[in-house]
Image (spheres, helix red, strand yellow):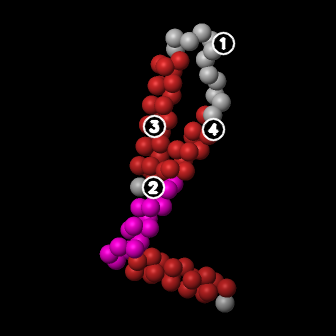
Amino acid sequence: MLSFVVLVQTVALGLADRVTTRVTAHLPSSRRPGDRGQATAEYAIVVVGAAVVGFLLITWATSGNGASKVGRLLDRVVDKVASTVS
């Protein structure tokens, strides 16, 4: 699932870069926008991707037997930590 989200983000960033290049290609170099706002756009894409992954995880964990799997996982983690400490 994570690899799919990374792929989607990579494709989206590539497409955004291509569109920006084509839109600004006709502008003189003095009027072309720089990288201002690029970090903000990348941050927004990462946040949206993380929200989607979180939503899918919560949906899986609260439906069907996902809740019991999460409970068993947490029980194993707590038991392992308790056995290591004692």
Q: CA distance from mark 2 to mark 3?
A: 15 Å
- Which residue lies at the image location 51% right of the left edge and 79% below the top edge? 74
- Which residue lies at the image location 41% right of the left edge and 61% below the top edge? 56
Determine which residue is flagged by label 1: 30
Disc on the earlier residue, 2 or 1: 1
Of circles 2 and 1, which is in front? 1
Q: Residues within 10 Å of mark 1 (few under 14, many from 20)?
A: few
Magenta span includes 53: yes
Disc on the earlier residue, 2 or 4: 4
Q: Quadrant of residue 40?
A: top right
Q: Quadrant of residue 42?
A: top right
Any mark on residue 52, and which?
Answer: 2
- Which residue lies at the image location 50% right of the left edge and 56% below the top edge? 51
Disc on the earlier residue, 1 or 4: 1
- Which residue lies at the image location 45% right of the left edge and 37% below the top edge? 12
Instruction: Tell me whether circle 2 and circle 1 mark residues in contact (CB < 8 Å).
Output: no
Q: Amino acid at mark 4?
A: Ala
Q: Amino acid at mark 3?
A: Ala
Any mark on residue 56, and which?
Answer: none
Q: Amino acid at mark 2?
A: Val
Determine which residue is flagged by label 3: 12
User: Of helix, strand and loop, which one carries label 1?
Assistant: loop
Determine which residue is flagged by label 4: 39
* Residue 3 falls left or right of residue 41: left
Q: CA distance from mark 4 to mark 3?
A: 14 Å
What span is colored magenta in the figure? 50-66
